[in-house]
Amino acid sequence: LWGEDYYMTHCMDHLHVGRIGDFSVLGDNMCIGANCADKNTASFHPFKNWKVWETCWDTANGHPPPPPPSQAPGAPAW
């Protein structure tokens, strides 16, 4: 089974699209980390769980998730 990166590489090669090694626009959680709040990053990889992806999406769009209830202001410390 092909992953999206493998598929896109072969698709672009088939179309004779050139490559540019600009890794500063990719937040790759496997190699360099994915800071979802970095406004200079164009894409984030990999997020296989939809909830983790959605959290990164929200953060990238300026809507970070609320803190967990135990860290919310005024929450009791158990």
Image (tube, rainbow, N blue to C red):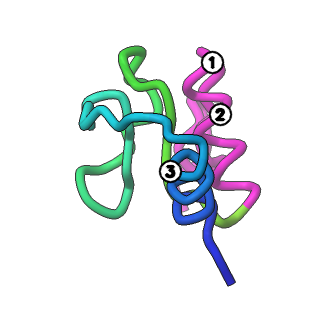
Q: CA distance from mark 3 to mark 1?
A: 31 Å
**In contact (CB < 8 Å): disc 3 and disc 2:** no
Q: Is residue 36 magenta?
A: no
Q: Pick whichever, 77 or 7, lies toward us.
A: 7
Query: Residue at position x 26%, y 31% from top?
Result: 22
The quadrant of the picture occupied by the N terminus is: bottom right
Residue 66 lies, in percent from the top left, at 65, 33
The dot on residue 13 is: 3
Q: Is residue 24 left or right of residue 52?
A: left
Question: In whole angstroms, how far apart are the C-alphas of marks 1 and 2?
Answer: 6 Å
Q: Secondary structure at mark 1?
A: loop
Residue 11's tag is none
Q: Amino acid at mark 3?
A: Asp
Q: Which residues are magenta?
A: 50-78
Image location (x, y in percent) of residue 63: 65, 20
Of the numbered discs 3 and 2, the one sitting upstream in the chain is 3
The residue shown at (38%, 37%) is 26
**Do the residues under discs 1 and 2 have CB atoms within 8 angstroms?**
yes
Q: Is residue 53 above or below residue 38?
A: below
The residue type indicated by label 1 comes to: Asn
Type of amino acid at the residue the image marks with label 2: Trp
Horizontal and vertical percent for residue 50?
76, 57
The residue that label 2 is drawn on is 57
Query: Image quarter for residue 75?
Result: top right
Q: CA distance from mark 3 to mark 2?
A: 29 Å
Disc 1 target residue: 61
* Residue placed most toward the observer, 56 or 78: 56
